[in-house]
Image (spheres, rainbow, N blue to C red):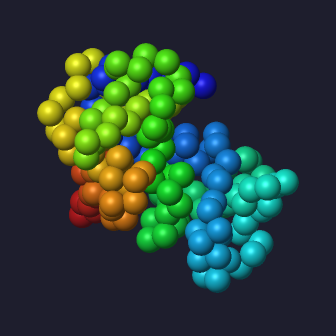
Amino acid sequence: MLFTPWQYIADWKCNTCGLCCKAYSVVLNFQEWLNIVKNYGVETTATGLNKLYLRRKSDGSCIFLYRLSNMYLCGLQHMKPIACKLWPFKILTSPKYGYAREAAYPYLGKTLYVYADSTCTGLQYGNPTWNFTNQTLKEFIEIAVGNRREQSKSTADISLTRQPTVIRRIF
């Protein structure tokens, strides 16, 4: 996977393609694991040598990924793990993937380094828009540093993403 510095991204919007839920294992912190186990049972999770994960279906996708028409939706929207809330962005305290100047994002007197997973189909490349820089990306950063829990810009807005088709009977 290739990581792109945020300053090469014009905008991002989740298009409910489900790629993130199909291609990656979701690492859970202990509290997330505990909440999921209490609500859905231990069989919805898996363990590695030193990590906790969401279980995957036989097709490799997340156990909580659901398809509705041509959209993929998260069954854990109300308790979505932090790893899912942040994807496709990585918010770091050092420029792990290079391009430090292009990845630098000033936040509360600190410099954070923000990259996007280039496999995400919701990324639009170009010069960052004001909304992306000051609203969407800021929300991702606030979630990453623990200053925000709820999402609005950093998740799919299914009411705007794809409107359901209405079929009318003609008599």
Q: Position of residue 64 (x, y in %)?
A: 60, 62
Q: Position of residue 118 (x, y in %)?
A: 48, 26
Query: Measured along the vertical axis of the image, is residue 92 above or below residue 167?
Result: above
Residue at x-position 41% and y-position 20%: 100
Residue at x-position 41% and y-position 32%: 113
Q: Position of residue 76 (x, y in %)?
A: 52, 67
| Side of 119 relative to 138 (left or right) | right
Residue at x-position 18% and y-position 29%: 129
Using the image as rendered, state which of residue 108 and residue 76 is in the foreground. Answer: 108
Residue at far right of view: 49
| Side of 126 relative to 57 (left or right) | left
Using the image as rendered, state which of residue 11 and residue 34 is in the foreground. Answer: 34
Using the image as rendered, state which of residue 87 and residue 167 is in the foreground. Answer: 87
Query: Measured along the vertical axis of the image, is residue 117 above or below residue 60?
Result: above
Q: Position of residue 95 (x, y in %)?
A: 48, 26
Instruction: Answer yes or no: is residue 69 visible.
Output: no
